[in-house]
Image (cartoon, rainbow, N blue to C red):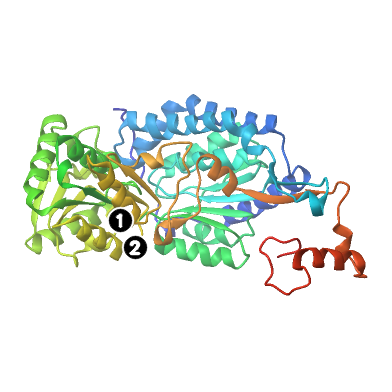
Amino acid sequence: MTTTTLVTPPSHSDVDDGPAIADLHRLHALQRTAFLADPYPSAEERKGHLMALAGMLLGHRDEIRAAMSADFAVHPELFTDLVEILGVAGRAAYALEQLDTWMADEERFADPAFYGTARAAVRYQAKGVIGNIVPWNVPFDLSVGPLVEMLAAGNRVIIKPSDYTPACAELLARMIGETFGEDRVAVSVGGLTLAKEFPTLRWDHLLYTGSPAIGREIARAAAENLVPVTLELGGKCPAVLAADSVDAQSVRTVVGTKLIKNGQMCISVDYAMVPRDQLDAFVEHATAYVDGQLPGYASSGDCAGIITERHHDRIVDLVAQARDAGVRVVQLGGDGDPATRRLPLTLVIDPPADLRIMQEEIFGPILPVVPYDDLDEAIAQINAGERPLGLYVFSKDEAQAERVLQRTTSGGACVNVCASQGALPSLGFGGIGQSGSGRHHGIEGFREFSNPRGVVVRGTGDLIDSFLPPYGAAAQAIVDSVLGGSQPPPVAGAPGAV
């Protein structure tokens, strides 16, 4: 584990955002001018940007690891490699492979009886200048990751990192500045005032990742300029274990996913649903996994620190409320280390619905284990809440797993695994309802940050002039050929329907 000097995020009151706000407006105007001068960069130029992006991450590996450890006090270096570096570089490599296909015009049908030899197609063009407001939990994956599809689509981008990760923000700004011209990609670093100013600009698209409460504020601010937004908002993601799957492998997958970044991940398992008569079996499997494979977890290099003291204290308070309510609490992995904000895993067994851990997104190493008596009850409980960003089903019976998927709604879902829907570069990722809107990753991300422009190129042998006044014999012949002299209801898709 690399030893680094801890960096305490500045309080919002410590930051003078005036210069940063002025620079944000300068960058926005600069990129707007640059886009108007070159609104449709070639495939070769875009590929160059993607290769530079991947090389940037790989070339700054040691610095990225150090910055993550500085901001989190402790952060598993191999996980940094897997997600913040290799995951994003792999996303860029996938976009490189697919870019020619993504950029190609998509032909649409034009009835030759009316349109003759005309050609119709959807052409994906860059939207323009895009803003990306980044959360603190995965500061490179959620800044440089979406940048892949934004650049693949031909856009200019300004990134606003979180002020809770100052070391990562400083490094990101330097990396981007060394790799791209500021008229292509720039980073705007600041505190609360800058964060409030950012969504008020007239972006061509805005991406925000974070909480639903702040997401509402972002959407309201963007709506003033009719700016389209992509919102990735998280929520309470359940893992449903069927009666045939409360076993060592399934429980290891659920618990291990919860321990990724010590629960500080938007697609982490927020709570597990287990048949009532197998609650003890779940606890036994979880205990065997942590004691056997993660001894002393909470003081090890695999345990990420909670991002700030305030966030740390909130997690401690959630556990204390459960204990005070007399709920069974099982602590695994040691006692933790307050100096580095590391906390153990805490299972909360059969918690009442009014506890905060059942009302709020946990975002820490607490796993409520909720019993159910039959699968329909579990499905009904999920559907009674907000639609989650992710939903995970464990069953050896494919039909049973499919039944849960068909009767629930979530941004993404997995069967017999957790969180993989957020890792595949080919799979569109996003939420629904309270958990967000829009998609990035893969072709869905390319299209999210593109304008799907409908283009018609007129050919010969058409009847298009029949729409132009004066309306006479030609127009009458078309109407008579469709209606046959009667007056049936309009035919869906007939020429001229809007």
Locate residue 38, reporting x and y percent. 76, 42
Circle 1 packing at 10 Å, graded few (<14), some (14-19), many (20+), is many
Q: Secondary structure at mark 1?
A: loop
Marked residue nearer the N-terminal end (1 or 2): 1
Q: Amino acid at mark 1?
A: Lys
Q: Which labelled disc corresponds to residue 280? A: none
Q: What residue does disc 1 label?
A: 236
Q: Amino acid at mark 2?
A: Glu
Q: What residue does disc 2 label?
A: 386
- Placement of the N terminus among the 4 image quadrants: top left
- Placement of the C terminus among the 4 image quadrants: bottom right
Locate residue 81, reporting x and y percent. 38, 29
For the residues bearing labels 1 and 2, Cβ distance under 8 angstroms: yes
Determine the image quadrant of residue 494: bottom right
Q: Nearer the viewer, residue 133 or 489?
A: 489
Q: Nearer the viewer, residue 165 or 274?
A: 274
- Above or below — where is 298 with respect to 469? above
